[in-house]
Image (spheres, grey):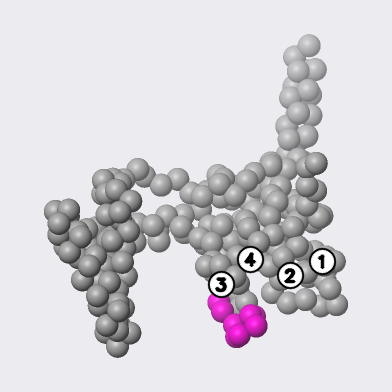
Amino acid sequence: MKKILIILCFCISLTYAQGYQSIDWKDLEGKVEAYDDPFEKLNDEQLYNFSILFEIKNMDASQVDKDLQVEMDEAKQFLDKEKIDIKYYFDQAERMIKKREKEEKQTNSTLNNKKVELSGFSLALGLNKGEIQEFLFVPYIGACIHTPPPPVNQILYVKSSKPVKVDDSFEPLTIKGVLTIKQNKNKLYLIDGEDEVQSGYVFLADEIKPFEYEE
């Protein structure tokens, strides 16, 4: 009986090892220690006026015309009237920017070298007769081109053992493969030039297929 149980456990373990863990993009985010966000104390109007003041204050002086100066002065007057400590929030904004930059690069160590399955959109680094073999994988269409790039931990660099036929640069795909935590930089060629995109993972694809939408 004991021998049978051992064999059964071995078979179950082998089946699990051969399978792929289905994950979503949220799973790629690393664990971040909880921290206090002072901006949660501000209401929407206060946040809006602070963002105007912060953005214009950080612009090059040559870019600030009369209209922007008026907008900045009005925002400051509003915040003063609301008794908002502007200097304090300026200091906190710098702190929060650094924290969020670190947060965006934080990867999930539990997924390192794991066999996973993930659906998203391909972003071709170069099309060869309608085929791709190395590409970026992102959570939403238009990422890095029509919108600001996602966080580093939301961009995967995919390498396939064989070319994959795609209809366009933003093909919705489901990929099975081995995920590795490794930062990588790739040049992305755009209509108006090129940009360097940093990814937080390398995804070695075993199987790539078109994403199947639920009816």
Q: Residues within 10 Å of mark 4 (few under 14, many from 20)?
A: some
Q: CA distance from mark 3 to mark 4?
A: 14 Å
Closer to the camera: disc 1 or disc 4?
A: 4
Find out whether the residues at labels 4 and 2 contact each other: C-beta distance under 8 Å: no
At label 3, the amino acid type is: Val
The answer to whether residue 162 is seen in the rendering is no
Dot label at residue 142 = 4
Q: CA distance from mark 1 to mark 3?
A: 21 Å
Closer to the camera: disc 4 or disc 2?
A: 4
Q: Is residue 26 magenta?
A: no
Q: CA distance from mark 1 to mark 4?
A: 16 Å
Residue 92 location (% of width, % of height): 24, 58
Q: Nearer the viewer, residue 61 or 81?
A: 81
| Residue under pointer 1 | 166
Q: Residue at x 28, y 61 (%)?
A: 49
Q: Which stretch is magenta? A: 189-196
In the picture, the quarter occupied by the N terminus is top right
Find out whether the residues at labels 1 and 3 contact each other: C-beta distance under 8 Å: no
Residue 90 location (% of width, % of height): 22, 63
